[in-house]
Amino acid sequence: MTDQTWHPPTGPGGSSGAGAQPGYGPPAPAGYGPAPQAGAGAPPPPAPGPAAPDQGWTPPPKPGLVPLRPLGFATLLGAPFQTIRRNPGPTFGSGLLVQVVVTVGTAAILLPFAFGFADRLERASAGDVDAIASGGVAALLLLMLVPIAVSVVGSAFLQGIMVVDVAAGALGDKAGFGMVWRRAAKRIWPLIGWVLLLAAAATVVVVVLVGIVLAFALIEPVLVFAGVAIAVLVGLGAAVLAAWLYTKLSLTPSAIVLEGRGLGSAMARSWRLTDGHFWRVFGVEVLVAVIVNVAAQVVVQPVSFVGGIASVLVDPTGTGAGLTVLIVTYVVAIGLSLVVGAVAAVAQSAVVALLYLDLRMRREGLDLELQRVVEQRHAGRDVADPFAA
């Protein structure tokens, strides 16, 4: 930068002030006052020129999905839905595919069983009804394991996919469908372990609550209400504990996919990142969940309500003419539920990945590393993975 500091003129000997010889050097430019006389003091400073460019704060770059700085509350709420608009194929497409596979798989397994079970009960003798009913319940519970397993794998894939897409979006990239699925597939077993752990914890809570009610009912039938009251209190306590634990561990999928950690190491990583930021993480996750669930009800429920009224208007006497309306309404409601469910699943998975990036920016300066990577990539240089552990 040009030195703008003023220096007094010097004489032949390098001295200044009274020993300076007048007449040396070019004449003073106009506007700077009279030339200094020999023996006079230092001349006045030059008049101020044009203002120098502002070298103060400039906003951080935003090459893609989010600005490369710690994220504000509004960004954390809006960016999960922006991921769908920005890259709908891998995000919404993957969410919809998972929803369709789970729904169709569940229907393909349970509907034939339900029809067969009903037919067998109808043809069974009075003495065999109880045995058939018991066997049917046991078979139903076993069959339910299949759609549950499909749902677990689909949920694990979707969480991994959204982590990859959000990380790529932060650097200004758009990950393709194949890329996000391949990268999520590499970490699928730890992701499945994470989803199974959540499912197992929820199952244990339900079993304990049901066991409390059954225990009181077996002791004395009239005590069943006391058992229900105790189960409700225990359930409330379990809900508070579950909310705390899940919030602390919710960044586990991001650490699994982006840092290549195992399940235990990723859970410990999530626990450390959320230290001191519990309420921020909890508030954002809950608010996004409330938004998507309220939106789902607003979209789906009016269709069911209008369909019910239409069936009554078409068939007020109950002759069966309104059955077609009910079927069409049911199909439309299922379709809307799949679409809204896909949006909800994608948004809730994306907000977890965004919180992970935000906390690494706040605690580890990841934003500076991402800015460096963006600059080096624009310069044509090879860069290492900025998200690696």
Image (cartoon, rainbow, N blue to C red):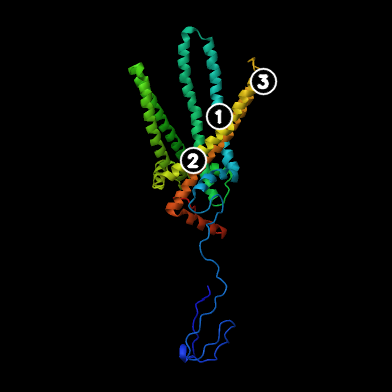
Q: Is residue 282 above or below residue 203?
A: below
Residue name at image x 45 percent, y 39 percent? 190
Residue at the spot x=54%, y=39% of the render? 346
C-alpha distance separating marks 3 and 2: 41 Å
Q: Nearer the viewer, residue 384 or 346?
A: 346
At label 3, which amino acid type do we have?
A: Val
Nearer-the-camera pick, 224 or 340: 224
The residue tagged 2 is 287
Tag 3 secondary structure: helix
Mark 1 or mark 3: which is in front? 3
On residue 314, which mark appears? 3
* Kind of residue at disc 1: Thr
Q: Earlier in the sequence, mark 1 or mark 2?
A: 1
Residue 275 x/y as whole percent = 39, 47
- Give the mark count: 3
Res 251 → quadrant = top left
Residue 137 visible in the snapshot: yes
Q: Quadrant of residue 54?
A: bottom right
Label 2: state its secondary structure. helix
Are the residues at dot 3 and dot 2 in contact (C-beta closer than 8 Å)?
no
In this view, the residue in front, 214 or 145, is 214
Q: Amino acid at mark 2?
A: Leu
Q: Which residue is mark 1?
A: 103
Q: Is residue 326 above or below residue 280?
A: above
The residue at 35%/19% (across/down) is 223
- Of marks 1 and 2, the one in the foreground: 2
